[in-house]
Amino acid sequence: MGIPEISLTESKRCLIAKVASGLCLATIPLYLFMLLMGIYIELAVQDKMSLIEGNRNALPAFMIILSIFGVVANILGARICWVVHDSKRRDAKKKYLKIFVILSLIICICVFVSSMLCFASIVSLRKLFGKGILASMKKYSTDRHKKHVIDLLQIQYECCGSTGYTDWFNIKFASKKYISDDYMTKEEQEIYA
């Protein structure tokens, strides 16, 4: 079973080429939006990297690289499709059209994978941030940088703890050097020792 032949008139070929060129140009703003989202995610997560327990998420870098690649490919694709609509220049650019179609399919697959990674990484990032916030809270009284990051995070997002305010009940959050032994019981002195 072979591929059926399709016969097109010259005017239909020109129309299809112009529409394809327009679609290539129409996708460029979407790739630019994806680029901006990748940069935003990278910058938003960058200042909270010290709170992530485990490996760094590579999704923003993947989104940035893929969107730049998509913009360049669609600009070239729009140019190729526009040139192909002219019957005099079609034969010289026809070989590039096949390459562009294959490249477009690869980019579509990568965009699909990227979108699935976005949804999958939400759960992963929540777990990593949860563990990282708890680990940082345990160092709250001894590490000034962790204290500053936790304070800013809780002020910015109006939250308390990792899962709730009860997280602070099991953590020594006051430094021993700021607490006087005169006002503590023996049990409290052992806790903060």
Image (tube, rainbow, N blue to C red):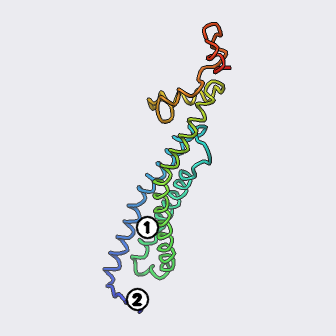
Identified at 57% across, 35% down, the residue is 134
Mark linked to residue 168 = none
Residue type highlighted by circle 1:
Ala
The residue where tag 1 is placed is: 78
**13 left or right of 151 in image:** left
The residue where tag 2 is placed is: 3
Q: Residue furthest front?
A: 187
Image quarter of the C terminus:
top right
Q: Nearer the viewer, residue 143 or 172?
A: 172
Q: Position of residue 135 (x, y in %)?
A: 60, 35
Identified at 57% across, 40% down, the residue is 131
Q: Nearer the viewer, residue 113 or 168?
A: 168
Q: Nearer the viewer, mark 2 or mark 1?
A: 2
Q: Position of residue 90 (x, y in %)?
A: 44, 80
Q: Residue furthest top?
A: 182
Is the residue under label 1 in contact with that under label 2 (CB below 8 Å)? no
Residue type highlighted by circle 2:
Ile
Q: Position of residue 141 (x, y in %)?
A: 63, 24
Whether residue 47 appears in this view of the structure is no
How would you rate the neighbour count of disc 2 (Cα within 10 Å): few for under 14, some for 14-19, many for 20 or more? few
Q: What is the spatial separation of the Cα atoms under label 2 and label 1, in whole angstroms?
A: 26 Å
| Quarter of the figure with residue 172 | top right
Q: Nearer the viewer, residue 166 or 47?
A: 166
Question: Relative to 100, does residue 31 appear above or below in the rendering?
Answer: above
| Quarter of the figure with residue 137 | top right
Q: Position of residue 75 (x, y in %)?
A: 47, 63
How would you rate the neighbour count of disc 1 (Cα within 10 Å): few for under 14, some for 14-19, many for 20 or more? many
